[in-house]
Amino acid sequence: MHSTEDNRHALVRRDEKISPVKLAAAQYVVAAVLLMLCAGLWRLQVLGADNYRLLAEANRVRKVPILAPRGRLLDREGRLLVDNYSSVSCFLMREQLRDADLPLIAQGLHLTMDQLESTLRHFQYAPKYQPIPLKQDITPDEQAFISAHANELPELETLEEQRRLYPRDGFASHLIGYVGEISENDLKNPKYDFYEPGDVVGKSGVEESYDAVLRGQDGSRDVIVNSHGREIGRLGEELAVPGKDLRLTLDLDIQMAAEQALEGKNGAIVAMDPHTGEILAMASRPNYDPNQFAVRLSKTYWNQIINDPEHPLLNKAIQAQVAPGSTFKIIMSAAGLEEGYAQTERVVCNGGMDFYGHYYHCDAHHGSVDIDHAIPWSCDVFYYVLGNKLGIDTVARYAKAFGLGQRTGIDLPQEAAGTMPSTEWKLKNFHQAWYAGEMISVSIGQGAVAATPLQMARALGGIASGGVLKRPHVVFPDEIPKEQREAFEESFPGSGDKTVPLKPEHWQTITEGMASVVNAPGGTGAAARLEGVDFAGKTGTAQVMSHDALARSNKGKKTQPNAWFVGMAPRRNPDIVVAVLWENGDWGKNSAKLAAQVIEAYVNKQRKKSGNIRLEQVSMSVAAPSSVDTNGAAVSDAASSTTSKAASPTSSKESLSATPKDKPATSATHEELPAAPAPKKPVTPVAPIAMKPKEPGPDA
């Protein structure tokens, strides 16, 4: 019985064995898996060998950037203005970064944890393999720290690069500008599509306008690194292409004179060659130190300049939009003469006049005044009457023709357009009609009229040149390739080159009047007369508040008028025009003295070039000229004995003599002028070029 039961269980066990079909299927599955594994190994070891060899090579080879030095800036004679100096910066390799290392890195590089974490956040979206700048221009002890901790902190690398070295004391800072690390907002601008986080770019002035020319092209070096990320060899390198040096139209000697004249004052001075539009000098006060921006800006200095009520970052030569005061009367004179009113107008000035139920003051009781005396005496009543006859739209048409209310097109960023009111302007901006009484204030450059010093220099220089106006520029056009030059002109729209027709007799009347401002007895700028120099111009005293408001005020410094002067030499077809805005400088004659310093520096330099060197320095005379000829030009023994025929930088024509030029300039004569001289071999000037910047404080 037991035997039968055992046999039955044996038969059941035989029935439970795996069938051949299932066994064959399992074998096929195993074979397929093995084939897949073999195919994968074949793909990795054979087909993908080159790719993985490159990846392995990338782990052992690191690409180190070689930063291109920016191009230097030279003055018109090839003298060095802005240079570079060698600097060492610390970069962070995030692929090897460990969070535990951050406190030690911050301590060794004299950074706070907040600064370090802020830098990491700034570059969080940049590729991991891209080194990020951790600290620029590190000190020798910080370099020693990195070397001493090379094994502990393999993520730290040093890189030698070139840093900007600017003139000290903010010399020409607003024209030159400064550089800084590109910001997140900049990267959103299509202008910076080809830039990356950490790039150094121009932030203002020439540095910003010509950044693409100055920055050059970065190179790279392939280095071999070990498992700790340390360099153990080099494979090759692609050299950086330095940026192009740029020769500016700036004249270092004239710029120095402008800076010295403006020292201790707030305002701006701009000097220009009206024949070409070349800017010879541009100074603005208060200024700032661009060397503070060249490495890393301290919070202390940044807060200091942005909270300064005088706005040191503002280039007042092209951005200060203020009432031009009586300098506007030259434009009024041109409009009045061309329209046929001014040459026959004669008024009696008793210190003011009533218009539309309001009494408008004049600075003096001038008595009987015609156009020949209205300019040198700056009689407000004459221009009140003239403006009332012309009307706002006629005056606005001439003012806009001479460039007011629009940008000049200078190749500097953020130029202001100013304001020239009209009936259309008021309706558009205030939805109100223009009232005739508003014209009275506009007639003397007050009211809604607002202009920059550059606009006034160009306008009055153009009038003195027979109506020929040139686009101002700070870089010689031949320094830039033609295609880039055209792009630059499109980037800086403005009124550009133009000619406003002026009848020769009207042109002569105006220029004689401006000569009398400085040289004739009773001229408002007589205190600035330069002996032996055909110097002309127009003063302006622009109120910053009404007479009623002034009477209610404490009459402090800020209530004093802005002092204007636009001067030129010679009086007709001038080789130089200088505009001065002295904020709260009181009377325009004060600014005339500053302009005379710049004109004097220019005249003396031209005389020296021509070999006509005077043993005694030309000095300003406060005395009235000994006599005045029938044309209004100053005549004296000294003047007749020192008449010079110094050539301008761009012209061989006689200039700066006591005898004015007799013919208005034309576009044709300007085109015939020879090109500016080629730059000389650059030499490092004595002052005011800066030394290597001091190390920033702990708040950097």
Image: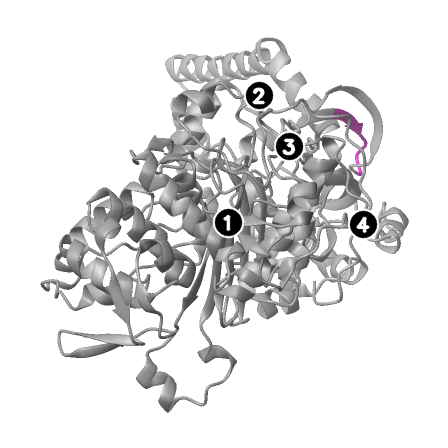
Question: Which quadrant of the rendered structure holds the C terminus?
Answer: bottom right
Q: Position of residue 187 (x, y in %)?
A: 47, 43
Q: Earlier in the sequence, mark 3 or mark 1?
A: 1
Say which of marks 4 and 2 sits in front: 2
Q: Which mark is residue 536?
A: 1
Q: Which residue is mark 2?
A: 675
Q: Earlier in the sequence, mark 4 or mark 2?
A: 2
Q: Earlier in the sequence, mark 2 or mark 3?
A: 3
Identity of the residue drawn at 64% across and 27% down = 244
Q: Earlier in the sequence, mark 1 or mark 2?
A: 1
Q: Earlier in the sequence, mark 4 or mark 3?
A: 3
Residue 128 vertical placement versus 540 (above, below) = above
Residue 538 vertical placement versus 131 (above, below) = below
Residue 284 vertical placement versus 571 (above, below) = below
Say which of marks 4 and 3 sits in front: 3
Q: Is residue 636 left or right of residue 385?
A: right
Does the segment drawn in magenta span residue 225?
A: yes
Q: Residues within 10 Å of mark 3 (few under 14, many from 20)?
A: some
Q: Residues within 10 Å of mark 2 (few under 14, many from 20)?
A: few
Q: CA distance from mark 3 to mark 1?
A: 17 Å
Query: What is the span of residues highlighted in magenta in the rendered image?
Result: 222-228
Q: CA distance from mark 4 to mark 2?
A: 36 Å
Q: Earlier in the sequence, mark 1 or mark 4?
A: 1
Q: Position of residue 493 (x, y in %)?
A: 36, 37
Does the segment drawn in magenta span residue 229?
A: no
Q: Residues within 10 Å of mark 4 (few under 14, many from 20)?
A: some
Residue 275 vertical placement versus 590 (above, below) = above
Residue 160 visible somewhere in the drawing: yes
Question: Which quadrant of the rendered structure holds the N terminus?
Answer: top left
Q: Which mark is residue 692?
A: 4
Q: Viewer-proximal residue, 313 or 302?
A: 313
Q: Which mark is residue 601?
A: none
